[in-house]
Image: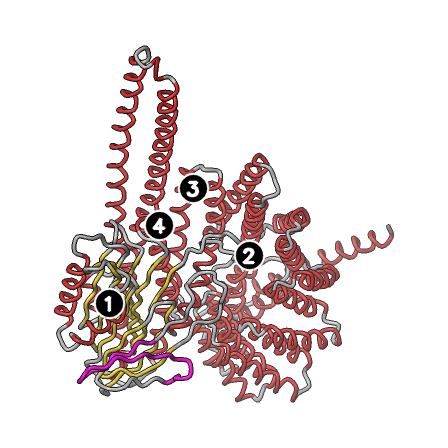
Amino acid sequence: MKKTLLIYFILIISSFSFAAKIDSLNQKLNETHSNILKAKILREICQHYYTISNDSVVKYSKIITDFTSNDTTTMLCKAKSYEDLAYVANQNKKFEDEEKYYLKAIELFLKLEKKSDLIKNYGNLANLFLHTARYDEALKSYRKSYEIAEILNDSTSIIISNINIGNVFKVQGKYSEAIQCYMLALKNSEKIKNEKYQAISLNSIGVVHWGNKSYEKAIQYIEKSLDLRNKLKDKKGASVCYLNIGIIYDEQGKFDDAIINYQKSLKLKREVDDKSGISKCYNNLGLSLKNKKNYSQAIEYYLKSLEIKREYSDKEGMSLVLGNISNLYNTIADSSNISASEKRENYHKAIEFGLESFQIANEIKSNQSLLFAANAIMYSYTKLENFEKAIEFAYKVIAYKDSLFSDEKTKVITEMDVKYQSEKHILEITNLEKQSLLDKKTIEIQDALSKKQQILIFSFIFGFIIILTFSTVLYRLFIQKKKANTLLAQQNQEILQQKEEIIAQRDEISKHRDLVVAQKEEIEDSINYAKRIQEAVLPISEASRAMLENHFILFRPKDIVSGDFYWIAKIQNRTIIAVADCTGHGVPGAFMSMLGISFLNEIVRNQEIVKANQILNKLREEIINALQQKGEFGEQKDGMDMSLIIINNSQLAIKNFIQAQWAGANNPLYIVKSEKLKVKNEDNTKVDELSTFNFQLDEVKPDKMPIAIYDRMNDFTNHEFELQKNDCIYLLSDGYADQFGGRNHKKFLSRNLKQLLITNCQLPMPEQKIILETTLLNWIGDGEQIDDITIVGIKI
């Protein structure tokens, strides 16, 4: 009690002292007529308000920045005031104002040649650029800070700059450059025996190895950092290390080890009263316990995390945790050991938490959180068979995914602009201008596609409901007819007495038949509409000609819509062409083709992955996640086969050959040349040859695994080779070779297709297409096409 009274007494005395000091400074301010003295007094007032009132700091700082004197003292006061204004803008998340004030502060510090202040302000400006994903600008500012630190031989600032530059490379996914920066920081820290920055560097190196999936190395480096943190009694830093180790174990599926490390991190965060960190630990514990199927404890930890987020009005964190809870209730509802009523109850809870997450995410305009919440809600409504609501949130998922894609695309274009502006070669500048125009067209096309995708999803769901209704009616008619036949056989003697009843039943059947016919017409109309949507998504002739000069596309769906698709993109002076064969054909196959096109756009145009096997690896990961494939017994093996080639266009104008790389999932690549194919990685490449007098056809064998979950989940092989001018390459599905026909109604077979291609390879591409189509029609004759058929031919 005495101690509390003493503290209270000290606070009262301090407040009186503070008020007296401010009054004294204001009196001095009113008495002086010198702008220099006024600036110094106002700076002193600002310093007194630092920990008390940001509004007062802004008020007095803006008075100083309005001074017009150019003397050294006033300019220094103005520079420091701009620095304070930038800090307050950061606290208020007004990032445009923050950038403006830091630039003004830097301008004045440059005039005053205050190098130490420049190191600090360039670093703060770079932190802002990094936070707002302007990575090239962040690198420029960090490097300026580094250069000035080298001039001053400021070892600590050099280390900090190296760590910060490494952070930018890490976020960009340039892990080798990030490791170099962190290693340099570690070496310099050891040189000056600064264990604090040694620990930071070691932890950063570990995080990069984690990003590279090198889990053992990651844990080794983070544990070294942890030893130094413990030595320095840095509880907050040690808690971060334990948290990172827990996340790595979580990703490896070692959930018990992850939980142990999360609990260690939680203990330290409680000791330093790190509320945000405590909430993060609770959330991660919830994720691990969910993965262990300990759902009751997972809920408990999620709710603890949510309580702290609500206490500190952390809306972004609240939205994330609510989304996790929604997903958890969906997982509980999907489990097989609960009753139907319990399933519905859990789906409703998932919707309840998902809607709250969605509402908060909408308030803070977080597209990532909106997408996360909308996905969970859509899934719940689908399981509850509330298709109207499911479609509503399916639209939202598409909208927010497209918005995220557009934001990322803008960032990438900006980074490319900054990079290429530094190049002096006239040819590269010309190429950049062409690329910029193409990117703008790509964005316009993507905007149009997003609207078409919305219509497509609605059509597919609507078509599915109609098909389900049609099937139900047919089944009921079948049952009724079976009962009627049995009744007629058993009561043959009573047939005259039941004549009127039979006539009535016949009339009823006629009504049902008319209904079925009407519904059939509606289904066909819906599928025809889906065909128009699919054709709009596939590259049209003008778009394909803009990216491929000399080519043909043979595209013949078996049904109205196709499970085959082809896809073309141009990025970074590379042309990427893919031909895919999805599981099934018709409406199910077309739905898979839309997923494939959407994911290819995101992987290549958004993430800019331009290595053939990496594109297939990433596409397989997205398909498995989208279809929630787990490899369990009896699970549907939906997926796709694909042949994908990347052609480097930049060399053909200079040399007579170009570099190309290819990867295949069950589908091969045919290359017709006048000489033997030169393959860089021959050990990993299987090539079959077929020769004529003047030409040779090489078949590059694919990996025997689909783009879906499979018994073998190795990385796809990347084949690299050179293509000469006038070489012909063919990407195709298996539909042409598998088509039955001819006199004996046998398959056409791939050897006949290869002979047809090599025989006609010297002809122009349009004529080759005509020959392929004519041969196919003659082969089918009066028969039926059994599968979707796609062949894309390109002459270099």
Asked whether, in this view, residue 76 is left or right of residue 699, the answer is right
Q: Nearer the viewer, mark 2 or mark 1?
A: 1
Q: Say few, some or many: other residues with alpha carbon within 10 Å of mark 4 (under 14 / 14 to 19 / 20 or more).
A: some
Would you name the residue on which mark 4 appears? Answer: 588
Would you name the residue on which mark 3 appears? 390
Estimate how packed mark 2 is, as few (under 14), some (14 to 19) or many (20 or more) residues with alpha carbons within 10 Å.
few
- Callout 1: SS: strand
Amino acid type for the residue under numbered disc 3 = Ala
For the residues labelled 3 and 2, the Cα–Cα distance comes to: 47 Å
Mark earlier in primary sequence (3, 4): 3
Image coordinates of residue 726 in percent, x first then y, are 19, 80
Residue that carries the numbered disc 2 in the rendered image: 55
Q: Earlier in the sequence, mark 4 or mark 1?
A: 4
Q: Amino acid at mark 1?
A: Val
Observer-nearest of 316 and 783: 783
Labels 1, 3: front one:
1
| Tags 3 and 4 touching, CB below 8 Å | no
Say whether marks 4 and 1 touch (CB < 8 Å).
no
What residue range appears in magenta? 680-700
**Place of residue 398 in the rendered image (x, y in percent of width and height, measured from the top left):** 38, 51
State which tag comes first along the sequence, 2 or 1: 2
